[in-house]
Every structure is written in structure tokens, then in C-alpha cells.
Image (cartoon, helix red, strand yellow):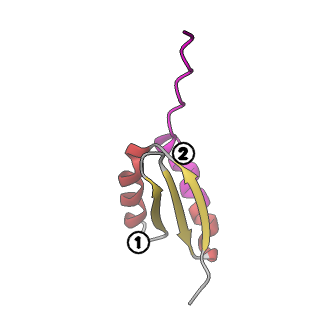
Amino acid sequence: MQNLAARTMIIAPARIGFFRFILEAYDNLAVLSTLDEKAGLVVLRYPPEATTEVATLLAALEPQLASPPCPAPQAQ
């Protein structure tokens, strides 16, 4: 079995399905596993030779996947 590269990321939880769909459209470029759905914590696994293509895709998708900032705590 081939060793896979892995990249753990936090994305907007509502965008996990979108991201999985995009990866499937890229002929299964990478496999996405959700570690914590509520937090948007995912891990992306892909063949090491696809590192450049994965990095290019992630850079292009960054605005669509970005997790919104947490609201500032309210002073009481």
C-alpha cells in the first residue's frame, strides 16, 4: 500500500460537503475525512505526487472554505 500525505485543516463546517464534492469532481484527487463536524476539523489524504495539484486547489478554494471568525466575547 502506498503511503499517503495528510493535511489536517479547519474549514467552515457548512462547507465540508462542498469540499468533498469538489474533490470527487477532481477524479478523487484526495480523500476527505471529517474529524469533528461541528468544529470543521477535517483531514485530507492524497498521494505525495499530487502535492502540487492539491496545494493549487486549496489555494483557489481558500475563500470558499474559510471558517468564519469566532465572535468576540461580549463584555458583561
Please state which amino acid type lies under the numbered disc 1: Asp
Residue depicted at 58% across the width and 76% down the height: 47
Residue depicted at 63% across the width and 68% down the height: 51
Residue depicted at 54% across the width and 9% down the height: 76
Looking at this rendering, what residue extends furthest in the top direction? 76
Residue topped by disc 1: 27
Return the x and y of residue 4 as percentages of the image width and height: 60, 77
The crowd level at tag 1 (other Cα within 10 Å; few <14, some 14-19, many 20+) is: few
Q: Give the range drawn in magenta.
A: 55-76
Return the x and y of residue 68 as percentages of the image width and height: 50, 33
Secondary structure at badge 2 equals helix
Looking at this rendering, what residue extends furthest in the bottom direction? 1
Asked if the residues shown at circle 1 and circle 2 are in contact, with their CB atoms under 8 angstroms apart, the answer is no
Q: Earlier in the sequence, mark 1 or mark 2?
A: 1
Q: Which of 11 and 41 is in front in this view?
A: 41
Q: Is residue 76 above or below residue 48?
A: above
The crowd level at tag 2 (other Cα within 10 Å; few <14, some 14-19, many 20+) is: few
Q: In this view, does 26 lie above or below 58?
A: below
Describe residue 55's horizontal placement relative to residue 61 as left or right.
right
Could you tell me how far apart the alpha carbons at marks 1 and 2 are, in whole angstroms? 20 Å
Looking at this rendering, what residue extends furthest in the front direction? 76
Q: Is residue 9 above or below residue 31?
A: above
Location of residue 52 (image quadrant): bottom right
Residue depicted at 48% across the width and 70% down the height: 29
Q: In this view, does 30 lie above or below 42?
A: below
Residue 71 in magenta stretch = yes
Q: Nearer the viewer, residue 26 or 65?
A: 65
Residue 73 in magenta stretch = yes
Residue topped by disc 2: 62
Please state which amino acid type lies under the numbered disc 2: Glu
Secondary structure at badge 1 equals loop
